[in-house]
Amino acid sequence: MDEAFLSQVTIRPMKIEDVETIVEIDRKVVGKPRPEYWKKLITEHPQNPYASLVAELNGKVIGFVVGEVSGWEFGVPDNIGWLTIIGVDPDYQHRGVARKLSEEFVKNLKAIGVKVIYTLVNWNEWDLLKFFREMGFTRGGDMINLELKIE
Ligand SMILES: CC(C)(COP(=O)(O)OP(=O)(O)OC[C@H]1O[C@@H](n2cnc3c(N)ncnc32)[C@H](O)[C@@H]1OP(=O)(O)O)[C@@H](O)C(=O)NCCC(=O)NCCS
């Protein structure tokens, strides 16, 4: 773990103005730009200070996590949180940035009473599965993923 590097990485709540940088990081990670997806995601969950965070290095956004806690706006959160998406700029991966983002995310949700955090990962995405396992996530027991193919 590169402690000197990580000590310069700060975590802060996401702002609407971060959207362009996040779209660019997401494009590098998934291979195609998804500006509409991001505009909708960020503007619909604007500045949720607990669950939507960015990692910054010298003022530049290098990673993000977006999650949800129902009811947080009213100060009476449900005890269930969701981690919707996490990503780190490939230029800065494998240096503990996602770990730092995820630890802050968990700490914030815990502080507002969340007891369990769910996330969905594609079975073929071994890197993400490994990452979530390292962060302490295990295979869920009480919820199952249902799907209906309509084409
Ligand atoms: C998965 C991802 C978020 C990890 O970011 P990162 O900053 O590189 O992760 P970290 O350096 O904090 O890694 C923490 C631990 O997770 C595991 N890990 C991270 N990336 C991994 C990979 N590619 N393969 C296997 N294990 C991995 C490691 O155990 C690592 O600990 P270690 O370095 O001490 O061994 C990043 O690779 C990414 O953005 N991937 C694409 C994400 C994506 O598709 N998101 C959309 C759906 S949610």
Image: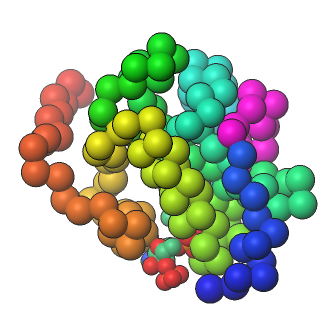
Q: Quadrant of residue 94?
A: bottom right
Q: Is residue 15 magenta?
A: yes
**Which residue is at 37% across, 37% downward?**
113
In the rendered image, residue 48, in percent from the top left (x then y), is placed at 59, 28
- Is most of the magenta stretch helix, strand or loop? helix
Q: Quadrant of residue 42?
A: top right
In the foreground, 102 or 31:
102
**Which residue is at 89% across, 60% downward?**
58
The boundaries of the magenta stretch are 13-26
In the foreground, 32 or 103:
103
Quick one: which residue is furthest to the top in this view? Answer: 74
Please indicate whether residue 128 sits to the left or right of residue 27 in the image: left
Please indicate whether residue 122 sits to the left or right of residue 140 in the image: right
User: Is residue 109 visible to us here?
Assistant: yes
Quick one: which residue is furthest to the bottom in this view? Answer: 1
Please indicate whether residue 26 sits to the left or right of residue 61 in the image: left
Asked if residue 126 is positioned above or below residue 82 in the image, the reply reads below
Asked if residue 107 is positioned above or below residue 93 in the image, the reply reads above
**Which residue is at 62% across, 85% downward?**
1
In the rendered image, residue 143, in percent from the top left (x then y), is placed at 13, 41
In the rendered image, residue 33, in percent from the top left (x then y), is placed at 66, 41
